[in-house]
Image (tube, grey):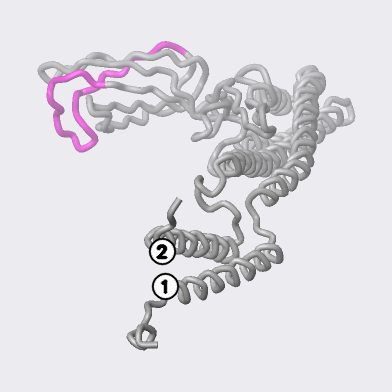
Amino acid sequence: MRITEKMVHRRLVASLQASKNRLTRSQERIGSSRNIRRPSDDPIGFMKVMNYRVQLSKVEQTEANIRSTYLVLSQMDSDLEAAGDLVLGLKNKASIMASDTSSAEDRLAVFAEVRLIFDDMLQKANTEFGGQYLFAGHKTTRPPYARQAIIKDSRASLSGGVADDLGYSLPADGDVTITVYDGAGTLVRTVSVGAQVAGDYTYSWDGTDDFGTTLPDADYDYQVSANFGNRVEYVGDQGAISQRIELNSSMVVNIPGSDVFGVEGDGVFSTMDDFMTALGSDDQAGIQSAIAAFDVDMNRIVEARGLLGMRIKRADSSSAAMSTIKPMIADNLARIEDVDVVLESAEYLATQEAYQAILKTAGSMLQLPSLLDYLR
C-alpha cells in the first residue's frame, strides 16, 4: 500500500485533534472537579449519577419532612401536657368542693376560677402552629372548637318586597344572630336577635339591607348562628394527615380534637360546663359526678400523648436511618462523579507533553522545502 503525503497529513491532523480533545476534557474535569459533565462522557456512569441524585434528593426531602413532623408532634405533645395539667387541677378542685367542709361561697369562688380555666382549655384545643390548627383534622384553616355555632343554613325568596320567614330551631339557650347573603355570596343584612331560650322560632325579614334599602327580588341565603356561652362545638373533622417520614412509607401526624377534647355533650368542655353548673347551684352530687368525668377526659389525653410518643420515637428512628443512608449515597455518587485531582493532574501533564510532541513532529514533517534546498 502506497502512503501518500495527503494520508500522512490527514493522520497528523487527526492525532493533533484527538490529543487536543483529551487535553480539553482533562482541563474540564480539573476545572469542574467532575468526571462526568455530559451523557457522552460516560453513558452508564451518567445514568448511575442521575439515579444517586434522585435518591439523595428523596432522602433530603424525607429529612425535611421529619424535621417538620417532629416540630408538629412536639407542639401537640406540649399542648396536651398542659391540657392534662388543667384537667388534673380541675379534678383536685372537684374533690375538694365535693366534701362537706366546702361552703356555697367556696364553690362560687371556684366557679370563677373554672371559668378562666375553661378559656385556657379552649385555647389549647385551638392551638395554631405554622398557620394551621393542629387539632382540626383536615379543616386546618379555622379553629376546631367554637362557642359560636351555625344552627341553620338555608334559603329564602324575596318577591314584591315580601320575604319568606326565616325559620330556625334553637337547641339550647343562646345569643342568636342572623346573616343574609345575596346570590354572589355578599353579606347584605345582619340581624342581632339577642338572647333566646331553646325552642322553634321564625324571623320576619323586611327585605332590606343594613342601610334600609329594599333589595331586588331574588333568592337569598341566610345563616342563623348562636353563641351558647360555655357550650363548645367541634367544627373540625376526623381527617388524618399523613407525612412521608421514611423513604417508602408515611405516618399519620395529627390527632383530631374530637379524639382528645371530645365533642359537644361528650368531652372535657361538657364536663367543665357541668362542673360549673354544679358549683353555681351548690350541687354536691353534680360535683361528685364531675370527678369521674374528669378521669375519662384525662384518660383520653393520656392515650393521645402515648400515641404521640410512639410517633415521635418513630420519627427519631427514621432520622437516625436517614443520617446513615445519606452519607452512603453521597459517597457512591462521589466515587463516580468526583475527580481525583492528583491523578487527573498527572494525566493532564502527560497529555500536554504528548500534545507538544505531536505538534513538534507535525511541524517538522509539514515543513515545506525552500528554494535553497533545491539548489544544493
Above or below: residue 242 compared with residue 133: above
Compared across the picture, whether 311 is left or right of 194 comes to right
Q: Report the residue marked by disc 2.
A: 9
Compared across the picture, whether 340 is left or right of 223 comes to right
- First in sequence: mark 2 vs mark 1: 2
Above or below: residue 131 compared with residue 91: below
Numbered badge on residue 206: none
Q: Where is residue 103 in the image (x, y as percent from the top left)?
A: 82, 31
Q: Distance between the residues labelled 2 and 1?
A: 7 Å
In front of the other: 233 or 210: 233
Q: Where is residue 332 in the image (x, y as percent from the top left)?
A: 71, 45
Above or below: residue 328 compared with residue 258: below
In front of the other: 34 or 263: 34
Q: Residues within 10 Å of mark 1 (few under 14, many from 20)?
A: few
Choose top left, top right, bottom left or bottom right for residue 105. top right
Dots 2 and 1: beta carbons under 8 Å?
A: yes
Magenta span contains residue 204? yes
The magenta span reads 199-220
Q: Residue at x 57, y 29 (%)?
A: 136
In front of the other: 332 or 203: 332
Compared across the picture, whether 131 is left or right of 303 comes to left
Tell me the element at label 1: loop
Magenta span contains residue 219? yes
Q: How crowded is mark 2: few (under 14 residues within 10 Å), some or many (20 or more)?
A: some
Numbered badge on residue 366: 1
Magenta: main secondary structure equals loop
Q: Position of residue 48 (x, y in %)?
A: 61, 40
Residue type of the residue flagged with mark 2: His
- The answer to whether residue 57 of the structure is visible from this angle is no
Residue at the farthest front position: 376
